[in-house]
Amino acid sequence: MPSGDVLPTATRGGFGARLWSRELSTYPESGTRRYNLFLVVAITVALYYELYVNGGVAPLILGQLQIPFPAFVLILAFGNLAGAFASLLAGLTDRLGRANLVVIGLGIVSAITLFVVPNLHSETGYAVTYGVVAFIEGIILVATPALIRDFSPQVGRATAMGFWTIGPVLGSLMVSLVTTYTLPIYGTWQSQYVICGIIGLCIFIVALFSLRELAPALRDQLMVSERDRVLIEARAKGLDIEASLRNPWRQMMHLDIVGSALGVSLLLLFYFTAVAFGTIYLMTVFDLSIAEANSVANWAWGSNAVALIIAGLVSDRLRVRKPFMLAGGIGAGLFMYLYLSLIGTHPSVATLSWVTAGQSILGGFAYTTWMASFTETVEAHNPALTATGLAVWGWIIRVVVTLCFLSLPKVIDSVTPLVEAPYFLGQLKSILAAHGTPGADLMAHIGAIKAAAAAAPVQWRTWYFICIAGVGVFLACIFVMRGRWSPAAARADEAAHNVLVAQELAKLKRA
């Protein structure tokens, strides 16, 4: 790890004390900052890979564990609800620190993924383990972007948040890529959890020994650029931390925080649908194989990852967020409409790939810049309550996703017969070979499969129109957030801030 000053408590005591004490007493040099930013991103990728791995093999899990689709959706819904309340608990990281929660959470989730889930044989066991993982992920959802914010001045915030946002996306990409290339070799859904768990434990070991965080007096201040470093360290010596943390939830209950968090949650309805049900959707509506469905996902998540970084770099260069949110949101909505217009047709895998890639690119532009703008909006109220503001967002997004998952089976009730169809057809062949003709029950089952196949396109089209409506709400919420529309005005704000910093430093020198 690059060098960086650590509080004296980090170097005293036994081995356990050294592992537990992670605070940096001075604002770190760029090498240490970048290392910790990279490590937080790696942790985020691993955690989301472990959370999303079920999506790549969902049809196999549902078939082998005999989980009806409505029950599977309920498992996801209540897991997200557990994550919502875990997000609120994560607001305590403003007081207790962030790094240890992240490291411990990664270790627990990786152990469950590697050792517990592959040995499950029931719907109940699957539901319990998913709930535990989702609860821990709800905490990490708040703690990791808070760490990113701590180590990134506003001038580079969109780029840093772009890298953090890559976490969920690369987690999804890992699912589709690893499934595409290893499932044909191993042939079981359990193999995907084993691979995922091993990767998670490797990253956990690195983080256990090297992840650091800023001391409270440093992280509780606003840092616009690296020029503020000396001033922040000087202020930290006299900062009243307790005063800045009083009534944290009341300080965050503002329209620009709550409204924008709701808006981005609705923007991401399409994303969460793709993560949880994308493979099922492509297999049941377009009759793709599981390998073809994951191939489409590879293009979607890969292009999204690239877009997140490009959007962050360009937004930081121009010093504005809102134009990217607006253009990205409108473009993502248009590609969603194009995507649903393919329902009921017979598009090629290539066509599905470029349409999903287009939606992912534009959605990435909107989301990266929103993350940067949201943390800056929270800082405008109180930079000491970054994790509390992110906890509000984490709770809202998880509640919205829970309601989304509870609503989806009511809109789409055709999935279970179609997911079970391959297993049923295998049984049907055995029965026909033994008895020659199917009975009344089998004929009824065949009829249910045909009816589901006819209903699926209409039902999925309805659901994606709901997702497009969510984009409309997001676009309206952009206008309540802090930040400039004009690059010239943003540069003028930065110049004025630099003048104030210079004046305060001059006062400190004279004192």
Image (cartoon, helix red, strand yellow):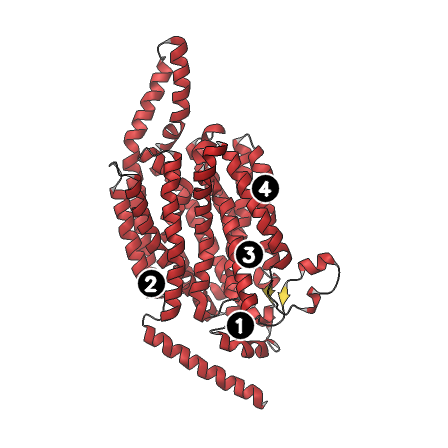
Task: Give me the C-alpha separation between circle 3 and circle 2.
Answer: 29 Å
Do tag 2 and tag 1 residues touch (Cβ < 8 Å)?
Answer: no
* Pointer 1 residue: 221
In the rendered image, the vertical position of residue 341 relative to residue 251, given as above or below: above
**The N terminus sits in image quarter:** bottom right
Image mark for residue 90: 3
User: Does residue 466 appear to the left or right of 13 in the view shown?
Assistant: left
Q: Residue 452 location in percent, x, y?
A: 32, 29
Q: Earlier in the sequence, mark 3 or mark 2?
A: 3
Task: Give me the C-alpha separation between circle 3 and circle 4.
Answer: 21 Å
Of tags 3 and 1, which is closer to the observer?
1
* Pointer 4 residue: 112
Q: Residue 267 location in percent, x, y?
A: 36, 53
* Pointer 2 residue: 324
Residue nearest the viewer, comparing 4 with 86: 4
Question: Which amino acid type is marked by label 3?
Answer: Ala
Q: Is residue 254 visible?
A: no
Q: Earlier in the sequence, mark 4 or mark 2?
A: 4
Of tags 3 and 4, which is closer to the observer?
4
Task: Give me the C-alpha separation between circle 3 and circle 1.
Answer: 19 Å
Residue nearest the viewer, comparing 295 with 477: 295
Q: Is residue 302 visible?
A: yes
Q: Earlier in the sequence, mark 3 or mark 4?
A: 3
Mark 2 is surrounded, within 10 Å at the Cα level, by few (under 14), some (14 to 19) or many (20 or more) other residues, namely many
Q: Residue 32 location in percent, x, y?
A: 57, 66
Question: Which amino acid type is marked by label 4?
Answer: Ile
Task: Give me the C-alpha separation between circle 2 and circle 1.
Answer: 27 Å
